[in-house]
Amino acid sequence: MLFLSSANIRDLSPYIQLADLLNYLQDSDERIRNAGAFAMGGVTAGIVDKFFPTLLSGLGSSADARTRSLLLHAVKEVRLDIKWR
């Protein structure tokens, strides 16, 4: 996941799907969950028109408060990444 921190520079959609990152949000380790949310925000910022609807869909369909919180963290990362471009 380390290379995903620079994902907002380019479109990584040929290499990773946002749905794959959702699995990290269910990990038992809180650090992995937080890193997954951060990476999800970075990947989404790289190609907003493709990934942001998926991110919002996950936010609307999640029944788990912890997962919703992590998805909101990812949305915040998207906003911050776009703001600093």
Image (spheres, rainbow, N blue to C red):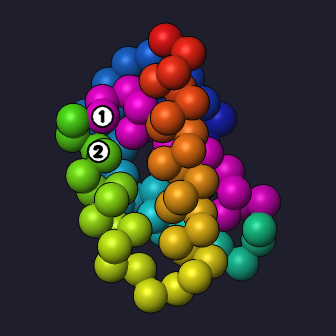
Tag 1 near tag 2, CB within 8 Å? yes
In this view of the protein, can residue 34 be seen by the observer? yes
Rendered location of residue 70, percent (x, y): 59, 63
Q: Which mark is residue 51?
A: 2
Rendered location of residue 69, percent (x, y): 60, 68
Residue type, numbered disc 1: Val
Q: Residue placed at 28% from the left, 65% from the top? A: 57
Q: Residues within 10 Å of mark 2 (few under 14, many from 20)?
A: many
Q: Which mark is residue 9?
A: none
In this view of the protein, can residue 42 be seen by the observer? no
Quadrant (top left, top right, bottom left, bottom right) of the N terminus: top right
Q: Nearer the viewer, residue 70 or 80?
A: 80
Magenta span:
31-48
- Lateral position of residue 53 relative to residue 78, left or right: left
Residue situated furthest top in the rendering: 85
Q: Is residue 74 above or below residue 29?
A: above
Check disc 1 and report its element: helix, strand or loop.
helix
- Lateral position of residue 28 relative to residue 54, left or right: right
Rendered location of residue 63, percent (x, y): 44, 88
Secondary structure mainly formed by the magenta segment? helix
Distance between mark 1 and mark 2 Cα atoms: 5 Å
Q: Residue placed at 35% from the left, 68% from the top? A: 58
Residue type, numbered disc 2: Phe
Q: Residue placed at 49% from the left, 35% from the top? A: 79
Q: Residues within 10 Å of mark 1 (few under 14, many from 20)?
A: some
Q: Residue placed at 34% from the left, 73% from the top? A: 60
Q: Is residue 14 above or below residue 70?
A: above
Query: Which residue matches tag 1?
Result: 48
Q: Is residue 34 above or below residue 44?
A: below
Q: Nearer the viewer, residue 62 or 5?
A: 62
Check disc 2 and report its element: helix, strand or loop.
helix
